[in-house]
Amino acid sequence: MIIFEKASKSFGRTLALNNVNLALPEGKIIGLFGPNGAGKSTLLKAAAGLVRLNSGQVTVDGKIPQQRRSKLAYLPEQNTLPPNWTIKRAAEFYRAFFDDWDNERYEKQLEFLNLKDGMRFTRASRGQWAKARLVLTLARQARYILLDEPFSGIDILAREEISKALVRDYSEGQQTIVIATHEIDEIENLVEHIVFMDNGRITVLGDADELRHQEGKSIVSIMKEAFRHGSK
């Protein structure tokens, strides 16, 4: 389980995480929602061991994230792969670096998303690039998959394909997928647990079905209301 305890992180005068206490349930698809600048990316980076907190702590199965790298697959919002690489070259890099690489899963996801591994990133559309990066992340058999804005800047058809790819090989109960996004509509029907952030704080938290039942609204409507209240 990924647990944050009194976690705070600031960048200059900006408080990205403000005394966050959060336990992410295991074996679920979790929607980490909130407007841009809410702290979502910082939360994921802290869980991946890429950001050092100013105070508090984050643990992954009882250890600091740096000691659990083999269990964590992190997809950053910004591309970090050389643009002149092919998908195949990137896959070879991942295969050499990560012991949990699953080549069969990689090939199935490539076919499912209609991608060719000989395609160079420089010749790929933004949607193809986004799908390729997702394939490389999902090809790992990591226990925790952390995705930062996987739908950012791509068209609606690519978003639908990515949503389907997320659940294609998902091992329910064995893997935890955390999807940080402000595009709530895209994954409303996928997520099982909701975390809504605003101004570095957790403002809404709970089981997706229970929240729908309690509020009598869709997740999109609940999140919009939470944002309106938080921005006042």
Image (cartoon, rainbow, N blue to C red):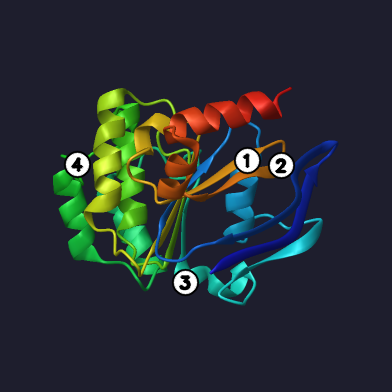
From the image, tell me which residue sits under label 1.
197
Q: What distance separates the C-alpha of mark 1 from that of mark 3?
A: 27 Å
Q: Which mark is residue 221?
A: none
Q: What distance separates the C-alpha of mark 2 from that of mark 4?
A: 35 Å
Q: Are marks 1 and 2 in contact (CB under 8 Å)?
A: yes
Q: Is residue 102 visible?
A: yes
Q: Residue at x 30, y 24 (%)?
A: 156
From the image, tell me which residue sits under label 4.
113
Q: Residue at x 77, y 49 (%)?
A: 9
Question: What is the total number of numbered labels drawn onto the structure image?
Answer: 4
Q: What distance separates the C-alpha of mark 1 from that of mark 2?
A: 6 Å
User: Residue 22 location, x and y as percent?
Assistant: 64, 58
Q: What distance separates the C-alpha of mark 3 from that of mark 2?
A: 28 Å
Quarter of the picture containing the C terminus is top right
Q: Residue at x 24, y 37 (%)?
A: 161
Closer to the camera in the image, 31 or 160: 31
Q: Which of the 4 image quarters holds residue 196?
A: top right
Q: What distance separates the C-alpha of mark 4 from that of mark 1?
A: 31 Å
Q: Which mark is residue 70?
A: 3
Q: Are marks 4 and 1 in contact (CB under 8 Å)?
A: no
| Up-down relation of residue 13 to residue 221 (above or below) | below
* Residue type at the position of mark 2: Gly
* Residue type at the position of mark 1: Met
